[in-house]
Amino acid sequence: MTHAPPGYETAITSAVVFDTSATGKLLLTGPDAPMFLGNLCTNDTKNLPLGGGCEAYLCDPRGKVQFAIWVYHLRLADGRHAMWVETTAGRNEELVRYFDRYLISEQVEIADVTAKFSQFHLAGPAAAAVLEKALGEAVPGLPEFAHMERTFGSSATCNIRRRDALGLPGYDIVCLTERATAVRQALTAAGAGAASDDCWEVLRIEAGLPIYGRDIDANRFVLEVARAARAVCYTKGCYLGQEPIVMARDRAGFVNRAFLGLRVLEGGPLPAGTKLFRDGQEVGIVTSSCHSPRLGLPVALGYVRWKHQEPGTRLDAETPAGRQAVEVTSLPPVPPIS
């Protein structure tokens, strides 16, 4: 496949495994952990059922995104309930400090377990079949973010989560670091191919998955991020940043910018920071871009101002090589594969 990074074709036709162990991983325990987390994040983590999970954001009082997180309610080996919180790779220590800042008298213990646990992401149309073969048993159908415990071989017990992060059927698989080699070998023996970091980057841009530090930063209002539609709950109790979020929804009914997809109609992928124009007026900015092997042309992610967001709207991207024509799309810019 022309311009496809190593592992891409296998990912979209069968299944590949990525090592995502650098993902930040925190464990919150104690009787007040669900309440403490719920008072800080945008989604309803207080009422997550055992075996459930969700996507959420942690904001400042202005509703600006400080962390993108994924939360799972699980039970530990000793029977205690816990909240497992994941965040962008390399931000685990910052997240501990963020939680510590708001921890006053609540009975919550915060442990950074990033180094203790390894993590893999199995993705592709054959992901479920590969997982079943590796485990030697049937895998139940799970809604996204639901999770279960299963054991590879005789001793590699893992937490397995349904998560379609890359626009492909997928699973996150978390295990103790000392069991990682056995788990990886089991997945490979069951048919999972290898894939490069470049493959992950292309797939996540095609899927419209924003990454904190590239597509989101600490000055970005949470409702401008497209995934806020599933990561912000309006029926839960108060949380940090709630007031400006509710005001934006109720008073304006829209936000000034929205995270959208773009198709690049001429030229190559767009550098991050490329400005977008319409009729000479600056109306947006590009945050990520790559060549899409499936479409045969470059695609991009970025923010586009209100009144210029209709799919099919033509814009000009100002690059060092000159202006390139782009077209606004909805998210994701490339249709997912089931």
Image (tube, rainbow, N blue to C red):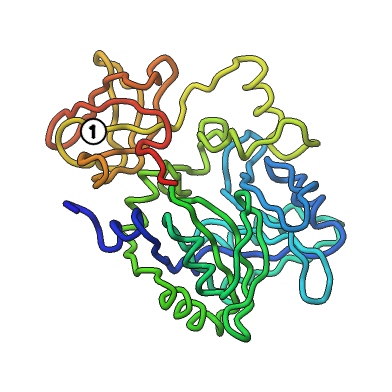
User: Quick one: 106 or 231, which is closer to the camera?
Assistant: 231
| Residue 146: percent from left, percent from top | 66, 54
State which quadrant residue 149 falls in: bottom right
| Residue 138: percent from left, percent from top | 60, 66
From the viewer's perspective, tell me whether residue 252 is left or right of residue 233: left
Residue type beneath disc 1 = Val
User: Among all residues in the image, which is located at the extreme left?
Assistant: 321
State which quadrant residue 283 falls in: top left
* Residue pictured at 47% horizontal, 67% vertical: 130
From the viewer's perspective, tell me whether residue 171 is left or right of residue 107: left
Q: Name the residue under label 1.
A: 264
User: Quick one: 4 or 313, which is closer to the camera?
Assistant: 4
* Residue pictured at 32% horizontal, 60% vertical: 10
From the viewer's perspective, tell me whether residue 158 is left or right of residue 10: right
| Residue 205: percent from left, percent from top | 36, 45
Tag 1 secondary structure: strand
State which quadrant residue 242 falls in: top right
